[in-house]
Image (cartoon, coloured by chain):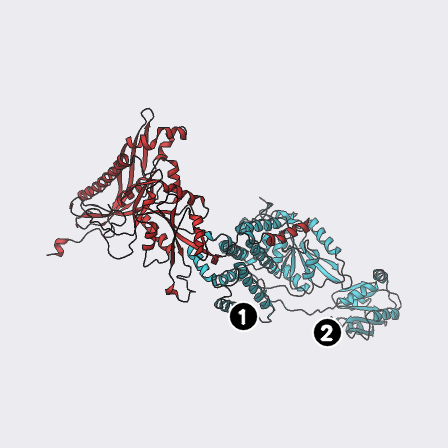
Chain colours: A red, B cyan
Amino acid sequence: MAKFCWLVIGLMPILFGCEDMVELEKQSYVVAVGIDKTDQDGTYQFTYQIANPEAGSSLAANNADQAPSEIISIVGTDLMTTSSTANAFVTKQMVMDQTRVLIISEELARTDQFLRVIQSVARSNQIRRGVKLVISKENASQFMNNNDPALEQRPHKYYQYMLSRARETGLIPDADIHRFFQITEGDADLFLGIYATTIEDPKDVSGPEDTIVAGEIPKHGGNSTQFMGAAVFKEGIMIDVLTAEETRIANILDKTMKMDELLASYPDPVAPEYNVAVKYIQKNEPKIEINYDRVANHAAIQVIIPFEAEIIAIPSLINYSQVDSYKERLKKSIESYAEHVTRQFIKKTQEFYRAEPFYWSLYIRKFFKDIPDFEEADWNKQIYPNADITVYYQMKRMHFGKMLDDTHLNEVRD
Amino acid sequence: MRKKKAQTQQKQTLSSDFVNNLDQLKNCFSYGVNNDFSIRLLQAKYNNKELALCYYASLVNSDKIEQSLISPLLEQEGASIFAIITAESVKKITLLEEVIENITSGKVVLLMQDEKVAFSIDVSNFQHRAVSQSEIESVVRGPKEAFTESIHVNISLIRKQVRNSQLITEVLKVGERSQQDIQLVYNKQIVNQELLDDIRQRINKIKVDNVPNLESLEQYIEERPYSIFPTIFYTERPDNASTYIDRGHVVLLMESSASCLILPVTFWTFFHNPEDRYARVAFGNFSRLIRYIALFFTLMISAIYVALANFHSEMIPPDLLLAITAARERVPFPLILEVIIMEVAFELIREAGIRIPSPLGPTIGIVGALILGQAAVEANIISPIIVIVSALSGLTSFAISDPSFNFTVRISRFIFIIAAGVFGMFSLMSALILWLMYVVSLKSFGVPYLAPLSPTFKSNRDVYFRRALKKERWRPAYLLPKDLQNMNKNK
């Protein structure tokens, strides 16, 4: 018996030897994948951005000559078979387990073809569930080719930093493939995808600076690629684009989104021609209370959002920090402005989308016996569009940064 | 045939014929050819009889013979020989076999005219090294002295730390042609009787001509000679010996071995270091934590690297992945071969370093390794990341201080690397589980190898980390000591 065991152990490496083994240098690492529509249904154009390992490596002799990545586009039916077709001109096996983003053109996202093509993405074991879903205004291949960051040239770093920072500032929603399928298959809420573009179309902004979407930022210099706003998906089809401000509101109202702090400007209550820059800090989750009337199939939703504010800039130089009445006015003004824009946005979702992007269906489920019961009541079409929703912002604390007192204008200009 | 002869010889007693006895001895020791063997004839003053002093000149202290034997015998008057000889130990012997044995172990045998008995006088003076610092198991804090190649010195080093009348040093004989003494040192009030019987039995079972030292004795009495795990603790530190005697272990000592064997022992004996107990709780446990990390690294880091890089590239962060890929693009060998090349190279340097006859040797070896590594990287034979991995795994292996256990770890590392090359993480974990199962199945003189962790026993609970000395209440129960409690006996 012992001899037999030794035989088995001894033969194991030889018989099974190195099954599935792939040397690292025999793989090409795809960092970003783009999918575009073609004229024919069922056929798509796939764009792969392959990282060049030699770029940025201290070993490469001519470091400067190395392009950080190679972008290829090829027409096919699904992601995986197309990648093997691509081996006609790509030297190594393309693997997608390091892929960061999936870029879908807005044109494709607005058709019912989108759900078909993204299904195959979910089935493949190479694509991670955490891959971010980005909707580009133009074609994905165009987006990827135009994207030319000067600093983070290596694409995986660019997407990692770009998306995580934009996410932290609340400009874009947290949108990965996992959440897309979770919400789409739950069939009760709207999914928000990341909206981005490389086509610059600056808008003249009056008022708070974030009532715009990607591409509309009035800027000079830097990469032309902008990530801002959110693509709204209803039942797997894109229906609209949210502005950055609306995206922030959706992030605040959605408890499943991690929301810490963001910088935004609010109208100055005393000098209305100015704005006040505020760091909005969310330390506690919003309270969402739903009262559901089963007979009338009607819900009353009350949302209380506690937050803290740090006043960063007061360009009007009004002494908010030391005059109590001003302070009170500022507090009320910030609260009411936030409530105003939030109510407006909720109204838009109720009337225009007739569904909500806040994942609130989670809190109504408890009123139903089982899923069929819940589905029959129809949160999406019946309950939410007709619900009475009240939103209150409660500022728990307001602080004024490092320097309480501003420059006294009349003393400087005497 | 030979055995029979030995038995008849053994029974032979001394005759009353002085000349005959002397001839027999001369015959036995090839007197005249064997230059070392000396016979001094003289006439005792007290009874005017012929005397012969037989001894090995190289083993005895000649001054002592002169002062305590020859001059009293020539000058003193007295009633019996015991009243004349001033040496501290005089024994009567009657068998020829005993005479031979006493002479070979450095005593002077005195034969007397018309006497059927001989007298053995202890004047032995074996040469040995002085007590020096322990070199293999050095500590910063704690006693520095180590055993030396003299059994008397070694026992005195132990007795210095265990001042107890119950500390027994029992002698067992081993070897048929060259008889050697083995000293069993234990505390009679603590040690388990069955354990002692087992050890005695195993030693008595050894039927070989010669067991020259402790190192070979270890291999004669251990249970699994082919195992990669040591089951007997070989240490050069007297403080280790006395600590384990106090817990109820048995210590074996032999002449001409500068160390002792402690048994039975567990995995923890090899992993723990005496300094863990000499340093304060926090400090000792900190260094132990570092050693756990070192153990993990030295066993696993190369294997994990092979598994991740060859089978699970998705688990490597992209920056590192691209860096490794870029480095690997110029290397001709498969990754697993690269790892094995470097690991073997490290082992080569290490083995050569031990054989280099200067304390500088290992340092030169390691520097050589780095230079070799550097050159190999520049020649694109291996990738730089491999140098880091194998240097880390080699360096951390030095944190496992026990030389026997160090071998275990180094051999296991190769098992794991090959296992990782078969199916990646899956086969690596299978190999680790099999390895652990094997460890659990081991026993050292009946004591499970992972006791008191598994199976659980009462003990001082010094397993992963130790507790304050004040709280160490029990002796290890897996030894079944006669006295389990260590402190607070009256409470």
- Lateral position of residue A304 relative to residue A50, left or right: left
Which amino acid type corresponds to the residue marked 2 in the rendered image? Asp
Image spot of residue A69 (x, y percent): 38, 58
Residue A231 appears at what percent x and percent y? 31, 43
Residue A292 higher or lower than B432, as above or below:
above
Taking the image as drawn, is residue B174 in sight?
A: yes
Single out the residue that lies furthest toward the front: A40
Q: Chain of mark 1?
A: B
- Could you say where residue B386 lies in the image, as x and y percent from the top left? 50, 61
User: Does residue B317 show up?
Assistant: no
Give the camera-side residue of A394 and A181.
Answer: A181
Mark sitting on residue B63? 2
**Of A222 and A264, which appears nearest the observer?**
A222
At mark 2, the secondary structure is helix
Q: Nearer the viewer, residue B368 or B88?
A: B368
Q: Which residue is mark 1?
A: B364
Earlier sequence position, callout 2 versus callout 1? 2
Crowd band around label 2 with a 10 angstrom C-alpha radius: few (<14), some (14–19), many (20+):
few
Residue extending farthest to the top is A295
Please tell me whether mark 2 or mark 1 is closer to you in this view.
1
Given the image, on which type of amino acid does mark 1 rest? Ile
Say the numbered circle drawn on residue A218.
none
**Count of numbered badges drawn on the protein:** 2
Helix, strand or loop under label 1: helix
Q: Is residue B388 above or below residue A320?
A: below
Residue B411 sits above or below residue B453 on the image: below
Q: Assign the C terminus of chain B to one quadrant of the image.
A: top right
Chain ID at mark 2: B
